[in-house]
Image (tube, grey):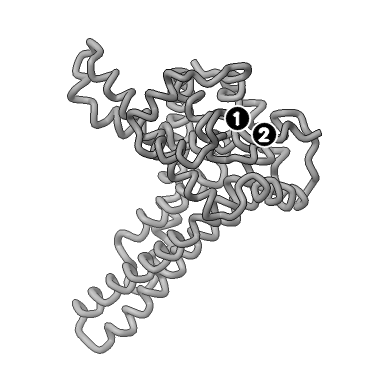
Amino acid sequence: MWDFNIGQALGLLGRTLPFVLLRAAVYFGITLAYILATGAGIGVGWGVGAFGDDEFRATAMAWGGIAGFGLTGAVMYWLREYILYIVKAGHVAVLVELIDGKPLPEGRGQIAHATAVVKGRFGQASLLFALDQLVKGVIRAVIGLVRGVLSILPIPYVRQLMGIVQAFLRVAVGFIDEVILAHAIRTRSTDPWGSAREALVLYGQNWKAMLRNAAWLTLFTYGLAFLIFLVMLAPAAALVYVMPGAWSAGGFVFALLFAWSVKAAFLEPFAVTCLMQVYFRITDGQEPDPEWDARLEQMSSHFRKLKERAGARFGTARDGEAA
């Protein structure tokens, strides 16, 4: 079974309600932006289509909707660094302090406090984003190692199912990069590269427990997201119906967007909180294993880049825990 405490995780999320609401505002705002931009594009296409026949109008509306959706996606891609910096890392920062039993400001003061903590650990958003990308690269290498282990086990049809297993593993580790960032915040390290290196080695030497819990959380979060998607199909289809020309695929896309926003706003922080519980518990008192450090260096170019930027030894430049 799993090693996390669901009740405690929900309690921690309740105590960080300002961040939960911030996440909801951000991700539901993104969904609304997609809907409005797509609808506006369809509307423009409908107007342009007045200069031609019905087939021309339908084509113009389709391209207008695609253009609106694509433009919004491009803007969101550009903003992803700042979403990570302000929303995700900030929420992780306050969760770390709550797990360690430290007091937090109430209300909106939590967000200002978390922003100061993240800025103190990582500096600019670009550094945190670069670090996060390297961490994800190392985690993908660990997935490759796990896939290799599974492929040689005497499990019936494992080779035929390897594509599904690989896809599941990729989803299952989607939350772990935030746990790695949590380690840097928790250790009060002023060397984020060295702290991430240490955290990844600790993750590697405990990969079985981490992946087992991540797998359970993947089933929970994506199962609930799928149910939300099914529930939202009808109202999303109704929304599309009132748009000019009633874009046929719109109901599916908008329901998918809403399910994604619920997952990102509520289900993902729950999963990250649970994984933080597991990671902190199983790594408490452990030292990074030099063999795992060497193994990660050998199989991941991202880990080698991380080591180049890190200090010469583990745990460099720690300030010690704040009082």
In the displayed image of the protein, which residue is found farthest to the bottom? Answer: 51
Could you tell me which residue is drawn at 60 percent across and 25 percent down? 277
View extreme (top): residue = 154
Depth check: give the residue in front, 253 or 126: 126
Secondary structure category for the residue under label 2: loop
Residue 247: x percent and y percent?
A: 32, 66
> Residue at left 48%, top 30%?
200
User: Which residue appears at 46% of the width and 47% of the height?
Assistant: 259
Residue 318: mark in rendering: 2
Q: In the image shown, does 166 or 6 lie closer to the viewer?
A: 166
Q: Which mark is residue 24?
A: none
Report the front residue among 78 and 123. Answer: 123
The kind of residue tagged 2 is Arg
Residue indicated by mark 1: 315
Residue 75, percent from left and from top: 45, 65
Location of residue 300 with respect to 77 vertically, above or below:
above
Q: Identity of the amino acid at label 1?
A: Gly
| Callout 1 touching callout 2 (CB < 8 Å) | yes
Count neighbours of disc 2 (C-alpha within 10 A) and say few if under 14, some if 14 to 19, many if 20 or more: some
- Seen at 23% across and 15% down, the residue is 152
Left/right of residue 168 with respect to residue 214 in the rendered view: left
Q: Total marks drawn?
A: 2
Where, by quadrant of the figure, is residue 285 drawn?
top right
Residue 93 place in picture, x, y as percent: 66, 41
Q: Is residue 233 left or right of residue 105?
A: left
Q: Quadrant of the C terminus?
A: top right
Residue 275 placement (x, y as % from top left): 55, 28
Mark 1–mark 2 distance (CA, rounded to whole Å): 6 Å
Q: Secondary structure at mark 1?
A: loop
